[in-house]
Amino acid sequence: MKMFRQALLLAGIVTAGVVGAQSSQMNNMIKVGANVGLAVPADNLSAAVGVDVSYQNLITPGFGLGIATGYTHYFGKDNNNLNNNDVGVIPAAALIRIYPKQTGFYFGTDLGYGFLVGDEKVASNSNVNRPDGGFYIKPEIGYHNKDWNFFVQYQKVFTGNDGAIGGQDYNVGNIGAGFSYNIPLGK
């Protein structure tokens, strides 16, 4: 039954892409953008700022697939006598976007692996090692036109229990907003 629901969802996504009204004159593009956010939950980090670079190919006029990467810097914060260090995320992800109309609302996600970079320790006053990375997800919804995308997002790297210190779970995630500019590569 679970497999049937997943197949039905995939069929719905592809159908939405086929009947969408996105312009077919710009099928391949590089997206370059920036984002800012607040860490959630905010145990060990306070805020995030990042840049995104991705390649997208419109498989159908309303359905895009591609690859995504970039860098997001998370700022550490003091918590329970811990001087938490900053951490960076470099994703290696697949990009999925659905455009119901030529301009207007869109939604999608990036899925892959998020590499964590920076100081080896979670906090400058602890011996606990920072995780190397984990499953990466970045769902977003927003507004698009031919040149620009403006969006709200949730970005998260799932690290399991790695990096936990005492009563503080290690978290790398944020809720934020951003924009990207589309650079056409032709048909």
Image (cartoon, rainbow, N blue to C red):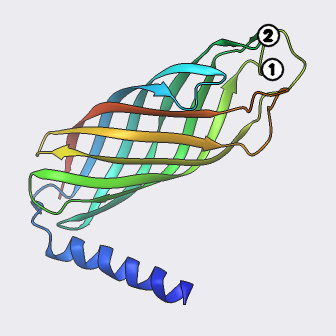
Q: Residue 124, which numbered label?
A: 2
Question: Could you tell me residue 13's position as x and y percent?
Answer: 31, 73
Q: Is residue 132 left or right of residue 140?
A: right
Q: Is residue 59 above or below residue 135?
A: below
Q: Is residue 32 above or below residue 15?
A: above
Question: Could you tell me residue 170's position as x and y percent?
Answer: 72, 32
Q: Amino acid at mark 2?
A: Ser
User: 30 or 132, which is in the foreground?
Assistant: 132
Dot 1 and dot 2 residues touching (CB under 8 Å): yes
Q: Residue at x 87, y 15 (%)?
A: 126
Q: Is residue 33 left or right of residue 127?
A: left
Residue neighbourhood size for the residue with mark 1, other residues' Cα within 10 Å, grouped as few (<14), some (14–19), many (≥20):
some
Question: Could you tell me residue 101's position as x and y percent?
Answer: 11, 60
Local SS, label 1: loop
Q: Is residue 125 left or right of residue 157?
A: right
Q: Residue at x 38, y 31 (%)?
A: 176
Q: Amino acid at mark 1?
A: Lys
Q: Residue 121, which numbered label?
A: 1
Asked which quadrant contains residue 121, the reply is top right
